[in-house]
Amino acid sequence: MSLPAEFHEIAKRVNNWGRWGTDDEIGTLNLITDEVVREAAATVRTGRRIPLALPLQQDGVQTGMIPGRVNPLHAMVQINQEIFGPGTVACSDDAVTMGLQAATHWDALTHVSHSGMIYNGRPADTVTAHAGAEFSGIDKPRHIVSRGVLLDVARARGADRLAGDHAVTPEDLEAAEEFAGIRVRSGDIVLVRTGQIQLYLAGDKHAYAYPSPGLSVRAPEWFHARDVAAVANDTLTFEMFPPEIEGLWLPVHALDLVEMGMLQGQNWNLEELSTACGQESRYTFLLSAMPEPFVGGTGTPVAPVAIL
Amino acid sequence: MSLPAEFHEIAKRVNNWGRWGTDDEIGTLNLITDEVVREAAATVRTGRRIPLALPLQQDGVQTGMIPGRVNPLHAMVQINQEIFGPGTVACSDDAVTMGLQAATHWDALTHVSHSGMIYNGRPADTVTAHAGAEFSGIDKPRHIVSRGVLLDVARARGADRLAGDHAVTPEDLEAAEEFAGIRVRSGDIVLVRTGQIQLYLAGDKHAYAYPSPGLSVRAPEWFHARDVAAVANDTLTFEMFPPEIEGLWLPVHALDLVEMGMLQGQNWNLEELSTACGQESRYTFLLSAMPEPFVGGTGTPVAPVAIL
Amino acid sequence: MSLPAEFHEIAKRVNNWGRWGTDDEIGTLNLITDEVVREAAATVRTGRRIPLALPLQQDGVQTGMIPGRVNPLHAMVQINQEIFGPGTVACSDDAVTMGLQAATHWDALTHVSHSGMIYNGRPADTVTAHAGAEFSGIDKPRHIVSRGVLLDVARARGADRLAGDHAVTPEDLEAAEEFAGIRVRSGDIVLVRTGQIQLYLAGDKHAYAYPSPGLSVRAPEWFHARDVAAVANDTLTFEMFPPEIEGLWLPVHALDLVEMGMLQGQNWNLEELSTACGQESRYTFLLSAMPEPFVGGTGTPVAPVAIL
Amino acid sequence: MSLPAEFHEIAKRVNNWGRWGTDDEIGTLNLITDEVVREAAATVRTGRRIPLALPLQQDGVQTGMIPGRVNPLHAMVQINQEIFGPGTVACSDDAVTMGLQAATHWDALTHVSHSGMIYNGRPADTVTAHAGAEFSGIDKPRHIVSRGVLLDVARARGADRLAGDHAVTPEDLEAAEEFAGIRVRSGDIVLVRTGQIQLYLAGDKHAYAYPSPGLSVRAPEWFHARDVAAVANDTLTFEMFPPEIEGLWLPVHALDLVEMGMLQGQNWNLEELSTACGQESRYTFLLSAMPEPFVGGTGTPVAPVAIL
């Protein structure tokens, strides 16, 4: 069994291998130039800041469906310990165990492979237990700061939240652009709001996980045409799940990460941002979403902040 | 045994308990107003971005000296796994175990207590194994974005790096202000460069740990006078270690975190930033240093970025 | 609120504080003398060995109901890594994160406290985040090897498995003795079979957890009268759950661990042992159930083996 | 580069592939028959028990030399938590992260591979991040109980501890047999004492690790001739380290685990056992050394006990 011809045709159209040189490991993040960042900073008007990460806790979004992707286990290793003797200043320390893709996160470009390959035509077996991702690990993008754009697909369609079987198409993205009165441009980080995360926030993590609206297999071509730097949304699966085309699992992951070399973000809480953008009637802002630089990591928790 | 009178006198002078209400859990971060952030964004000129986090890896800065504070253990739980069947898109997933104060990090206000108290006069025993820090955990500051100021104490003194027994005094901080041609103001996040981290970068983590230059017990009063929002530096211990006053361990931690309610950052790599600020002859920038929102956490890894 | 008078009366009757000296940390394990072990070894007739531990895996018995008690997360840190160069012998290494009470385990005597006390009248606050259990940690029993006795309460009652609301009483235990044709004596480790673990083995971990048969609040007196060294069973909760007496949670834990100083084992798979004992018509054997010596641990995974 | 001819010649002589069928996953543990265990139980005379595991603690034997093989990190997740309300019985729970080969442990047969193969001629790539060891994982031996034999090579040579460059040869093993007045036979678990662990016990874990006495590349043939079930010793590296033959790393691991299919144990504390055997003038006993059944594990902590 292999991926269908249809997938390979789209793959050819969005492929960025070699575009930034054969040594490149960060893909479309190359589109975030100093100029893009300068202009992004210039979008700041009120100074209002909206955090987009979910709290990191054991009662997180993971349901156990994905083996090894564990919610954070937070444990104290010192509590008010007077390590230098009685009556001295006392210390509390803690440690955590968690899946790097468990919570609000970025997928590294190496999070998926297909046909034995990762981004930029490297062999998938360069990911090892010893070193993690030798190429394109999450430690390779040194900074992820750019103009952020909220494409509020749910609100643009007059809905609080999209239905579980809704695949977000290029037409949806353009309707959201129109709704926002903006146009996505090269180097932007696009945040696609479906409203699905409301289910998790309301306490039903199983409903949040499945079925889930998400990006259509047709969306990557649109992101490619606009030269988007990265895309994140408010779902567990990023793309529609169960999949749009029966038997074709995770095509958007493969197109974004492997073919385009474009980072994806999942489980981003866009609710407060949606409200704020609505209030201020503007949908662009400075976005800082720095990866924790896990050497060889295929993902990272991230605490993004939109600065309006 | 208890803390000396000298400590308690300084404590009184820098104490902020009640200043932002009895319910407050974030202390001096209250000083970062929308206006401060607006002005911080306006400092961006070139769009150049400098990351300040050390790579997260097992060969990190921890030497084993601090019980429980373990360097990151990164492990793969899936490598190119075709979870949906042969020939499908393959996934790689990873997990990590690490001390929250192990790498480039923020201390939460609850990281230390003294005399049975934490910030804002709450009892220290509100930190529990069950819930971590009930108050002032690292999940409470929702955003840490402000104007960053580099006080390059080493360069201001004409040194690459301060000696191991150098306590950074208010006079040093003012000399660094003068060197930079700026003045620290309310809501700033101050980055104090000692150059000490060069020892770690050169491969000697023991020399990096000890002896270490760091902030003098006299520094908190200066931060308090200037109404600084947070302070970070490029050492393991933050303050001079072994301590300036024999037998008085971690006084700066206690003054900053407990009395002032001011977050501290440690193990920040300020080398590239120092070079960049020198090149551009300016020492202020937009700084984003978002905590990962570990619920009840007494610290967090952070991947700060300076945007020039 | 405090524990009812009824509880305190039983507590007085089973209390062993001081019985083995004020310094004692292992309680009824003192009853396992060399002579007991000699006689236990003499029970071996066929040499047949029956393991009693459940496999350690992420799909373990924990449902997430108990905060922090996580199923094992097993991850590879090296896979066939030629650490000494190409063509050399290759190594595979792995690491695990797990709750010490998550799988087939022993509770240490310090796993519970009541009224601020642990076994032998020590204050409960001797358990700290820094050191774990200073007294009576799971590292303190140096060996747990004795005569094992299977009290097959389910089979003695002609059932495959007890109902979810069945509290195992002294009468049940004596009926099981009679069924087995043996008498429990000083220093024995008693394995009480309810059959409840069949639910987990059949794939329903929620049904396994709750409701669950288990030991009655009246059982500890019987164990005390017989001078049993330790007791284990095939349930998640050890004692009947929800509790026998409304509002009185975990009384058996408190009586066994705190008052008697008697170790408890949970999630022991007694199915194969039940079959073997039935086949051989004998219910005593040599039992080795060594704790992993986690310093300060309040529990430990255990891989017990019955040698028939 | 590949392994030298010399290695391959020994490999041929000790190879057990197919000996217990092509489906076999446990190798020489097949030699532990019920009869062997019956006779092992019959060696028990005094009932004295000697534990052989080192305490599990963060200050364990690992020095950081082996990537990913971390000492145990023990952390409390509940301390005297009244989970059912104020005044109820309070619970303490803990969790651990550790390398499976970090402390006193068994190597699973899959811990090493050579020339792309593991025990019984299976391909090495059956070890995956997803499932760990599909074949011959540490969950496959259901019980490890047999006659234990202490070959006290150090004492037989009149030494407290062997020199760091001492390779334990067949002649050494036979001298230790003679010293003990016994003969190793089929199904025995052989404990080879070098005394090296005294260095760790005295606080010098670096000296313990390296240089280290250990088994000679000639030893596996002797174990094969005697049909030993498993071998453990009191060193970090099991075999002499640095290696006996320059450039030939871990040959004993490859011969024992891959060719013979014989489990190895490391970091076993044989000091107290040596004293006890000397006192009682006998060197055989019942040994229980049950692996924790980590599914797919390539190793396991073990708490062995010798019953004399």
Image: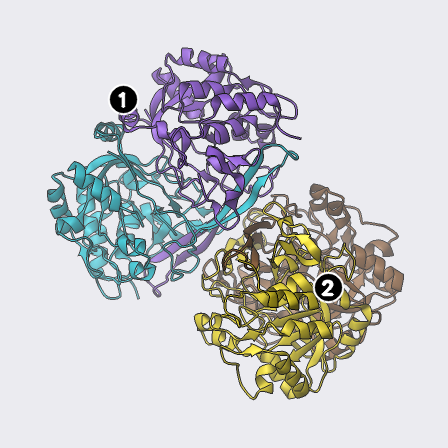
Chain colours: A yellow, B brown, C cyan, D purple
Q: Residue furthest front?
A: A5
D216 is higher (above) or lower (below) than C287 = above
- Residue D187's tag is none
Please indicate, yes or no, whether residue A196 appears anywhere in the rendered image.
yes
Q: CA distance from mark 2 to mark 1?
A: 75 Å
User: Looking at this view, is A193 or A38 the one in front?
Assistant: A193
Is residue A197 toward the left or the right of residue C181 in the image?
right
Residue drawn where x is 46% and y is 11% of the image: D175
Q: Which mark is residue A16?
A: 2
Eye-nearest disc, 2 or 1? 2
Between A57 and A192, the residue placed more toward the observer is: A192
- Chain letter belonging to callout 1: D
Tell me the element at label 1: loop
Q: Is residue A105 visible?
A: no
Q: Quadrant of the C terminus of chain A?
A: bottom right
What residue is shown with label 1?
D45
Residue at x 45%, y 62% (from the top left corner): A65
How many labels, in total?
2
Amino acid type, label 2: Asn
Residue beneath the point at 61% across and 78% down: A169
Q: What crowding class fits label 2: few (fewer than 14 Cα within 10 Å), some (14-19), or many (20 or more)?
A: many
Q: In the rendering, at what x and y percent does residue B194 appear? A: 78, 53
At mark 2, the secondary structure is loop
